[in-house]
Amino acid sequence: MSIFFHENTRTARAVSLLLFLFILSSCVNFSTKHDVTRTSSQLGEELQKLLLTTGSTVISDNSVLANFNSYPNAKIKDFVLANENLVSALLLRRAKTNSLSIALEQLTKFDDEEDTTLVVSALLLFPDEQQHLLRSLKQSNVYTDEILNDAVLYSALDPSLLFEKTASNGGSEYRITPLINSVSVSLYTYESGVYNQVYFRKVGTPEWQDARSLEWDAISNAMTGSIIHLEGDTDYEVKVFVEQGSNEYTHLYGFSTRPNYPSVSNSTIYLRDIYSGGSIDLSEYIDAGTPDAWVRVDGTDVEIIGDQENNFALSLGDLSHIVLENINITNAKIYGIYARQAHHVWINNCEIQGYGRTAGDVRDGVSYIDADATRPINYDSGIYLRETGVVTVENCEIHSPNIAANHWGHGHPYGANAMLVTANHSNPEYQGQYIVRNNKFYGSDDVRFNDVIESRLNLRRHGGFIRDSAIHDNYLAFANDDIIELDGGQHNVLVYNNRITQGYNGISIAPNMHGPNFIFNNYIYDLGDQRNYEWAALKMGGIVSAPGGVTNFFYNIVHTDGNGIAAGRVRNDSTFWVNSRNNLFLLNQYSDGKRGYPYLDTENYFLNEFKNDIVFNLRKVRPELYALNASDILLHEDSYDMEFIYSAINSATVFSRISFENNIKNFGVTPNATDPVGDQDDKTNLIDLHETLLSSFSNQNKDNGFYVHSESSIELEGNTWVTLPVDPSQINDNTEFYYQLTIEGEMPEIVGFAFENDNTLSSDRTVKLAGTQSYGIAIGEHASKTISGSIRISDLIDGKVDRIVFILDNDSRRDSKVTFADLSIEVDVTNVFNALSDNQTTDLQVIGLTQ
């Protein structure tokens, strides 16, 4: 809450902490009234009398302070003194107008921070007038709903004092918001703590499926939640069973998920017919579409090269019901695609690069336009959707901005983003509702984003994606701050099935000002900024200073050097609220009290839940928990199974070990599911090259120069050794490794493979196929630059194999590169399916990084 206090930074931090402690000690479970009086009168009345009788204008005057110092509640006393100018003005104006609400209306600063502080002061000092005051302020419209709601929550009051039960949905008793593969459900007619069960089914099918129960949302005063794994363009029914006291209720609703492609008009507008070079504002050429006839704009065969007169290369203005398809942008002054106050926008199959400003001056590592600029270059974005909602962005590739963000060593990162979002359309019906799926947004090690996906208005409930959105099945990489920044409103915002790598943080939830959100089924790995510094897979904070929603973190795999879930200060508040269940945390490094923890929870917030996660620190060779909250953590038993932990690094079936009773309805692994056998050949290929699991091997990897061409082909250059994990249970006497390689340029020292079981080089596990140096097990013709063949692994290597190392040893720095192609590991699957029938955990695929 440090933004409330303007005297000085030290005071701000001190009072922030004191008020934070006050809120916790005053029942964060939302009591409706505080004991803040010494006598039968209210503290505000006593202070007002002291000011009037002494003729003082501020509470710190000695004549007032002498009496006030005896006040027993030190936390409220310190809050009042830290904000004495605002509090004194409020009390004197109340004395003059004889009305607390009129005093507040006359004192409004039209500044969110000071106005919130004024309302908090009134609520704390005049507890007997809270309900009447809030109703009056609500009706006057002088203070925004957001300020009033913040003040209520900062004062640890029940939000229902301010909002009617149906206020969040225009008076309706429920709201259902479908996306393509999910739906959110909110019921506004019940109180908190009510038992409920949720079921859903396709229309016309007999069986109901279980969904996760709705949870309480104190901001909207509603029960709410999401249902996932739905099919697009499909009719569904949802049934909610509720027990309230001795009464039982059943609610039945119908809805249709959104189609996988909108209904477009019969005619397509081809960009080549209207584009003549430079930047283009489509709102000057076309009209908005309609719900039944979206306007489709096809950019096939057009390269958009934006000019320097416009900030954008392509603008939608405030158009609605527009499909942009096959858009190729290679230059833009600041933004590739830009919209403001648009809605119902569909962007499909775009490529955007070469956008953003260039640095004319660099000061302390931070880029500026020129030497006269006072603000760093920031927010330049491939796609910037401003005050725009109901959006789908899919199958797009955004990369290679013109500006590289600075890292935290030079202060907060500034620079470009792949996508920048403010979803606060002026019409509440069009707010949020984003679908961002099947995209590749990536920088490079040298030219990193600030955030890959960034949101604006981080400390506003109407900031970020706001509500009812889904970010899924994307490859997101290379940022000096966050890969995904959700900060702000996150009401039923879903983040799932993403591959997230190479950022200082994976996902930022700092703060979550309106939950619940759901972060699940993501693979967060190999984090680190350009210095290789990292903090957390999930950065959280601000649940007290900027309340207040829960983050649900389910079925994620986190494999990195830093922390799993850790705090980032929001208004000097490190408190977060998370429900972490059924995740796998593999932490490579450890530093006491700083990194290597699945949960670095320094505040030990009483609502946090950490249950059934599999946790292991590979440096400490044990589960390592932060001492403050270790006693409240219930780990999965496999956290202590060394054999399982090491196999889990290479196994896609880790979550099949989650027991039925710990499975999360609709989110978890289907109970009793078996791998389909069907009509299969006797052999199956276990190689599936993906960039996300490739990592440096030992201390041999000097350049890390590799490029994955396909699931069975990888190119190395420089002096590069990279390793791909494989499932050791599949390497047996019948396992055959097939390969083809081509060497370009000079012959390097060693080209080949190593079949290892740790991260240490062993000559008896290294197979040399070509090269000038004598090392390892030499097979084949060492002078040839094109080689193909196969290796029966058990004939050459003894013991377990859990990783394959691809080797281009080039210490002498020759101009060399090698391409390994047609890679496969084939194994007789008969024994595999026998193992499955014996209920053994077996995986038929090697996991790797996905581009």
Image (spheres, helix red, strand yellow):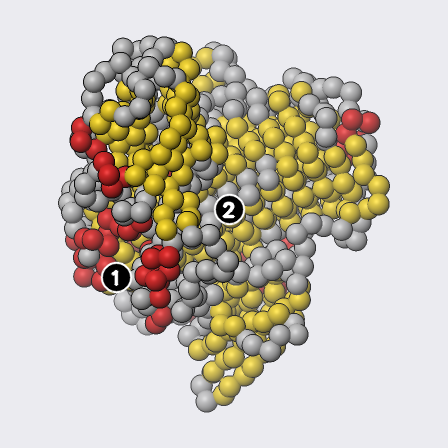
Name the residue nearer the viewer: 47 or 56: 47
Neighbour class for label 1 at 10 Å: few (<14), some, many (≥20)? many
Q: Relative to 376, is 194 above or below?
A: below
Q: Position of residue 148 (x, y in %)?
A: 50, 56
The residue drawn where x is 33% and y is 57% is 831
Residue 842 image point, x, y percent: 33, 56
Q: Which residue is mark 2?
A: 473
Q: Amino acid at mark 1?
A: His
Q: Is residue 445 visible?
A: no
- Residue at figure coordinates x 42%, y 41% from the top left: 688
The residue at the point 18 percent across, 28 percent down is: 763
Q: Residue at x 46, y 89 (%)?
A: 246
Q: Residues within 10 Å of mark 2 (few under 14, many from 20)?
A: some
The residue pinned by badge 1 equals 636
Q: In the rendered image, which quarter is residue 269 located in?
A: top right
Element at badge 2? loop
- Residue type of the residue flagged with mark 2: Asp
User: Closer to the camera, 64 or 88?
Assistant: 88
Residue placed farthest to the bottom in the image? 246
> Mark 1 falls on what kind of element?
loop
Q: Quadrant of residue 706?
A: top left
